Amino acid sequence: MISLDTNSIQEDPNDTNNEQELSDDVQELEIGKLKAEIDGLKAKNEDSRNDTKLKKKLAERTFRFMEGFVTLIFVYLTYYICYFTWYRMEVPKEVVIALITTSLAAVVGLVGFILKGLFGSK
Protein backbone atom coordinates (compact mmCIF):
# COMPACT_ATOMS: atom_id res chain seq x y z
CA MET A 1 0.00 0.00 0.00
CA ILE A 2 0.98 3.44 -0.73
CA SER A 3 0.51 6.04 1.89
CA LEU A 4 0.73 9.73 1.31
CA ASP A 5 1.86 11.79 4.16
CA THR A 6 0.98 15.42 3.50
CA ASN A 7 2.33 16.57 6.81
CA SER A 8 5.87 15.96 5.70
CA ILE A 9 5.57 18.41 2.79
CA GLN A 10 6.97 21.75 3.72
CA GLU A 11 6.50 24.97 1.83
CA ASP A 12 9.53 26.45 0.22
CA PRO A 13 10.02 30.07 1.41
CA ASN A 14 11.27 30.96 -2.10
CA ASP A 15 7.86 30.08 -3.55
CA THR A 16 6.18 32.89 -1.65
CA ASN A 17 8.88 35.31 -2.78
CA ASN A 18 8.41 34.18 -6.38
CA GLU A 19 4.67 34.63 -6.10
CA GLN A 20 5.14 38.11 -4.62
CA GLU A 21 7.55 39.09 -7.40
CA LEU A 22 5.13 37.76 -10.00
CA SER A 23 2.28 39.71 -8.40
CA ASP A 24 4.43 42.87 -8.42
CA ASP A 25 5.30 42.34 -12.10
CA VAL A 26 1.63 41.93 -12.98
CA GLN A 27 0.76 45.12 -11.11
CA GLU A 28 3.53 47.01 -12.92
CA LEU A 29 2.22 45.75 -16.26
CA GLU A 30 -1.32 46.82 -15.36
CA ILE A 31 -0.06 50.25 -14.29
CA GLY A 32 1.89 50.55 -17.54
CA LYS A 33 -1.21 49.65 -19.56
CA LEU A 34 -3.30 52.20 -17.67
CA LYS A 35 -0.67 54.92 -18.18
CA ALA A 36 -0.53 54.14 -21.90
CA GLU A 37 -4.33 54.31 -22.08
CA ILE A 38 -4.34 57.65 -20.25
CA ASP A 39 -1.67 59.02 -22.60
CA GLY A 40 -3.75 57.90 -25.59
CA LEU A 41 -6.86 59.61 -24.20
CA LYS A 42 -4.90 62.80 -23.53
CA ALA A 43 -3.61 62.80 -27.11
CA LYS A 44 -7.12 62.21 -28.46
CA ASN A 45 -8.45 65.04 -26.29
CA GLU A 46 -5.71 67.39 -27.54
CA ASP A 47 -6.53 66.46 -31.16
CA SER A 48 -10.18 67.20 -30.50
CA ARG A 49 -9.29 70.61 -29.06
CA ASN A 50 -7.11 71.40 -32.05
CA ASP A 51 -9.89 70.34 -34.45
CA THR A 52 -12.34 72.60 -32.61
CA LYS A 53 -9.96 75.56 -32.83
CA LEU A 54 -9.41 74.94 -36.52
CA LYS A 55 -13.12 74.63 -37.24
CA LYS A 56 -13.83 77.83 -35.32
CA LYS A 57 -11.17 79.68 -37.29
CA LEU A 58 -12.49 78.38 -40.61
CA ALA A 59 -16.08 79.21 -39.68
CA GLU A 60 -15.07 82.79 -38.83
CA ARG A 61 -13.20 83.17 -42.12
CA THR A 62 -16.12 81.75 -44.07
CA PHE A 63 -18.48 84.18 -42.38
CA ARG A 64 -16.14 87.11 -43.15
CA PHE A 65 -16.00 85.99 -46.78
CA MET A 66 -19.78 85.92 -46.92
CA GLU A 67 -19.99 89.38 -45.37
CA GLY A 68 -17.45 90.74 -47.84
CA PHE A 69 -19.18 89.18 -50.82
CA VAL A 70 -22.59 90.52 -49.84
CA THR A 71 -21.06 93.96 -49.20
CA LEU A 72 -19.43 93.92 -52.63
CA ILE A 73 -22.72 93.00 -54.29
CA PHE A 74 -24.45 95.79 -52.35
CA VAL A 75 -21.84 98.34 -53.50
CA TYR A 76 -22.11 97.15 -57.10
CA LEU A 77 -25.91 97.26 -56.99
CA THR A 78 -25.88 100.74 -55.46
CA TYR A 79 -23.51 101.95 -58.17
CA TYR A 80 -25.70 100.36 -60.85
CA ILE A 81 -28.85 102.03 -59.53
CA CYS A 82 -27.10 105.39 -59.07
CA TYR A 83 -25.79 105.23 -62.64
CA PHE A 84 -29.28 104.76 -64.06
CA THR A 85 -30.73 107.37 -61.72
CA TRP A 86 -28.04 109.92 -62.63
CA TYR A 87 -28.81 109.66 -66.33
CA ARG A 88 -32.56 109.66 -65.63
CA MET A 89 -33.13 106.22 -67.06
CA GLU A 90 -35.41 103.57 -65.69
CA VAL A 91 -33.61 100.86 -63.71
CA PRO A 92 -34.38 97.45 -65.27
CA LYS A 93 -36.02 95.46 -62.48
CA GLU A 94 -35.21 92.13 -64.09
CA VAL A 95 -31.48 92.86 -64.00
CA VAL A 96 -31.57 93.92 -60.36
CA ILE A 97 -33.61 90.87 -59.34
CA ALA A 98 -31.35 88.52 -61.30
CA LEU A 99 -28.20 90.08 -59.81
CA ILE A 100 -29.44 89.86 -56.25
CA THR A 101 -30.88 86.37 -56.59
CA THR A 102 -27.94 84.72 -58.33
CA SER A 103 -25.33 86.40 -56.17
CA LEU A 104 -26.94 85.55 -52.88
CA ALA A 105 -27.85 82.05 -53.98
CA ALA A 106 -24.27 81.45 -55.07
CA VAL A 107 -22.68 82.72 -51.87
CA VAL A 108 -25.17 81.01 -49.55
CA GLY A 109 -24.91 77.76 -51.50
CA LEU A 110 -21.12 77.84 -51.54
CA VAL A 111 -20.86 78.70 -47.87
CA GLY A 112 -23.44 76.04 -47.01
CA PHE A 113 -21.52 73.45 -49.01
CA ILE A 114 -18.23 74.36 -47.30
CA LEU A 115 -19.71 74.40 -43.80
CA LYS A 116 -21.55 71.12 -44.31
CA GLY A 117 -18.27 69.51 -45.28
CA LEU A 118 -16.55 71.14 -42.32
CA PHE A 119 -19.15 70.38 -39.69
CA GLY A 120 -20.88 67.42 -41.35
CA SER A 121 -23.03 65.17 -39.25
CA LYS A 122 -21.55 61.88 -38.16
Image (cartoon, rainbow, N blue to C red):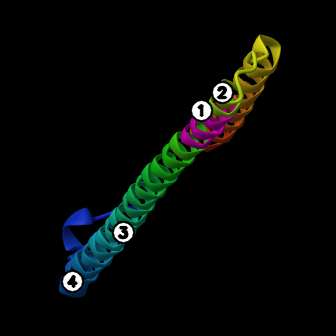
Alpha-carbon span between mark 4 and mark 2: 95 Å
Say which of marks 4 and 3 sits in front: 3
Judging from the image, what secondary structure is the residue with disc 1 in? helix
The amino acid sitting under disc 2 is: Ile
Q: Look at the image and give the residue range highlighted in magenta.
A: 71-80
Q: CA distance from mark 2 to mark 1?
A: 5 Å
Label located before the other in sequence (4 or 1):
4
Towards the viewer: 53 or 64: 64
Q: Earlier in the sequence, mark 4 or mark 3?
A: 4
Give the spatial CA distance, label 4 vs label 1.
91 Å
Determine which residue is flagged by label 1. 78
For label 3, the crowd category at 10 Å Cα-Cα, with few meaning under 14, some 14 to 19 and many 20 or more, is few
Quadrant of image for the N terminus = bottom left
Residue on which the image places disc 2: 81
Q: Position of residue 47 (x, y in %)?
A: 45, 61
Q: Which mark is residue 39?
A: 3
Q: For this view, does 117 lie left or right of residue 39?
A: right
Give the farthest residue toward the bottom: 14
Q: Is residue 16 above or below residue 120?
A: below
- Which of the 4 quarters of the picture holds residue 112? top right
Residue at the image position 76 percent from the left and 12 percent from the top: 93
